[in-house]
Amino acid sequence: KLAPLIAPSILSADLARLGEEVENVLAAGADIVHFDVMDNHYVPNLTFGPTICEALRKYGVTAPIDVHLMVEPVDELAAMFAKAGATYITFHPEATRHVDRSLQAIKAAGCKAGLVFNPATPLDVLKYVMDKVDMVLLMSVNPGFGGQSFIPAALTKLAEARALIDAYVAEHPGREIRLEIDGGVKTDNIAAIAAAGADTFVAGSAIFGAKDYAATISAMKAAIAA
Ligand code: DX5
Ligand code: ZN
């Protein structure tokens, strides 16, 4: 099993002080920066594009940046994010016409690639592209906003995805595929989420809404380890 990673979602950061916020949350023990891209088309909200990702790199952020594309179509923006310094680029399979081609393009651009599944989207496509996937991201809320409640059915789905990933990795030693969960993750449900199979934990409001980032992140890590 891969080491657990805490991925604060900058959607809930104080965006007027984004550089500082990212610096602070990394100093507080976060492992990876979750970067939510919304286009007011695939989801009913609008956030930030590749220039902001590039700005974080220029500011000095060296931690992995986990770009979650909630956009349609996918390919042009994915290419721009690869140039802007993204580490992971994940997208929703229904938002692109050719899932396999989009994954290949992200890998060819030098990034890690992943697929994101909405709460009611089946994992079907995954088995055909497992060789091109470095991250499987399960949504435990409907995408578009921070601060929503965790949808419990995501726990069963996590177990399903965990079984698929473990079976694939057993046949392909050395392959690393992360299983990430996104939406409504808090200190008090993260243990159950970890037990269901997640190894990468997005948390927006739970971390940036807290007074003490370090205390919150340590509490999350302790709950995962317990
Ligand atoms: C929702 C985003 C999430 C969101 C999570 O569309 O993908 O990353 O920021 O926020 P919380 O942790 O507050 O549910
Ligand atoms: Zn997200």
Image (spheres, rainbow, N blue to C red):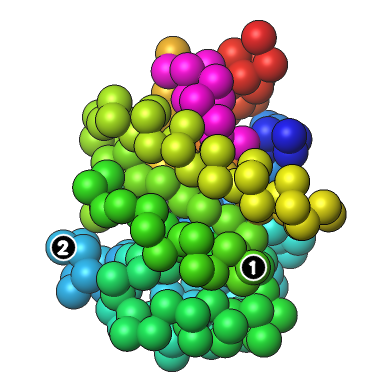
User: Residue 223's image quarter?
Assistant: top right
Q: Does 226 sit left or right of 69 as displayed?
A: right
Q: Quick one: 49 or 77, which is closer to the camera?
A: 77
- Asked if residue 6 shows in the view, the reply is no
Q: Quick one: 73 or 144, which is closer to the camera?
A: 73
* Residue at the disc numbered 1: 131
Alpha carbons under labels 1 and 2: distance apart:
32 Å
Sequence-wise, which precedes: disc 1 or disc 2? 2
Most extreme residue toward the bottom is 76
For label 2, the SS is: loop
Viewport quadrant of the N terminus: top right
Q: Does 117 sit left or right of 162 as displayed?
A: left
| Residue visible at 38% across and 37% down in the picture | 157
Q: Three-letter amino acid code at disc 2?
A: Pro
42 lies above or below 170: below
Q: Quick one: 42 or 205, which is closer to the camera?
A: 42
| Residue visible at 36% across and 69% down in the picture | 93
212 lies above or below 13: above
| Magenta-span inclusion, residue 104 | no
- Asked if residue 170 shows in the view, the reply is yes
Residue 101 disc label: none
| Residue visible at 60% across and 25% down in the picture | 217
| Magenta-span inclusion, residue 194 | yes
Most extreme residue toward the top is 226
Viewport quadrant of the C terminus: top right
